[in-house]
Image (spheres, rainbow, N blue to C red):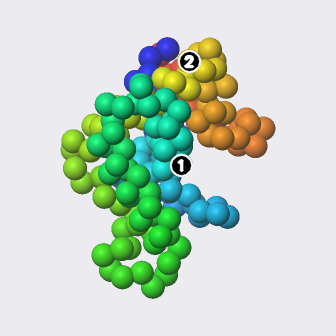
Amino acid sequence: MTIDLLYDAVAFAETGGEASPWIRTRIQPPGGSTAYGPVQLTAHKAGDYMDRFFPVLSPFLNFFATFAAQGHKFRRWGGVSDAPEGMRKYNYGGAGDIGGNEQDKREYARFCKAIMQIDLYAVNYNLGRFIERWRGVPESEDPGYFEKVKQHFYQEV
């Protein structure tokens, strides 16, 4: 089980149907969401993991600062129908700041894969438990998502 295959499978399930995966989620749940990018990492999860696993994730501190700042803008401008033109990219479905910069795209992938590796280790390399940990809900609540990840993952193996 490689982290690259896992990243690709999650990206397929999260943003595989989008013209560009470099977007904020289009789904506006109660309480909001800052999910962004190919694997829809949230600013909350990124911050939590930076706090708890700083020795492992410290090489990503600069990227995390950019990602966290974008998350703050997502929280501020998400769902605001009359947002100023320059802030619309932070609304649901917006491009945010990271999608246009190749270095940030590479760092996003490296950062997400490091977080995924932490999660994968925590569940003893069990794919179903990893998906549940990443998605935040059990398979019974979102079986279609689990199936997409598993199907794509096993196609690539």
Look at mark 2 in the image and give the residue it sits on.
121
In terms of sequence position, does the residue under pointer 1 or pointer 2 come before the other? 1
- Horizontal arrangement in the rendering, residue 98 relative to residue 54 (left or right): left
Q: Nearer the viewer, residue 68 or 155?
A: 68
Q: Nearer the viewer, residue 63 or 157?
A: 63
Determine the CA span between mark 1 and mark 2: 20 Å
User: Identity of the amino acid at label 1?
Assistant: His
- Horizontal arrangement in the rendering, residue 38 relative to residue 129 (left or right): left
Name the residue located 30 percent from the left edge and 75 percent from the top edge: 86
* Placement of 36 over or under 117, stated as above or below: below
Counting from the top left corner in percent of width and height, residue 71 is at: 44, 57
**Outermost residue toward the bottom in this view:** 82
Counting from the top left corner in percent of width and height, residue 88 is at: 38, 73
Look at mark 1 in the image and give the residue it sits on.
44
- Residue 40 appears in the picture as rendered: yes
User: Identity of the amino acid at label 2?
Assistant: Tyr
**Disc 2 crowd, CA 10 A, few/some/many (<14, 14-19, 20+):** few
Counting from the top left corner in percent of width and height, residue 2 is at: 44, 17
**Outermost residue toward the left in this view:** 102
Name the residue located 44 percent from the left edge and 31 percent from the top edge: 54
Name the residue located 36 percent from the left edge and 68 percent from the top edge: 89
Counting from the top left corner in percent of width and height, residue 3 is at: 44, 22
Which structural element holds mark 2? helix
Which structural element holds mark 1? helix
User: Splitting the image into 4 quarters, where does residue 16 fall?
Assistant: top left
Q: Nearer the viewer, mark 1 or mark 2?
A: 1
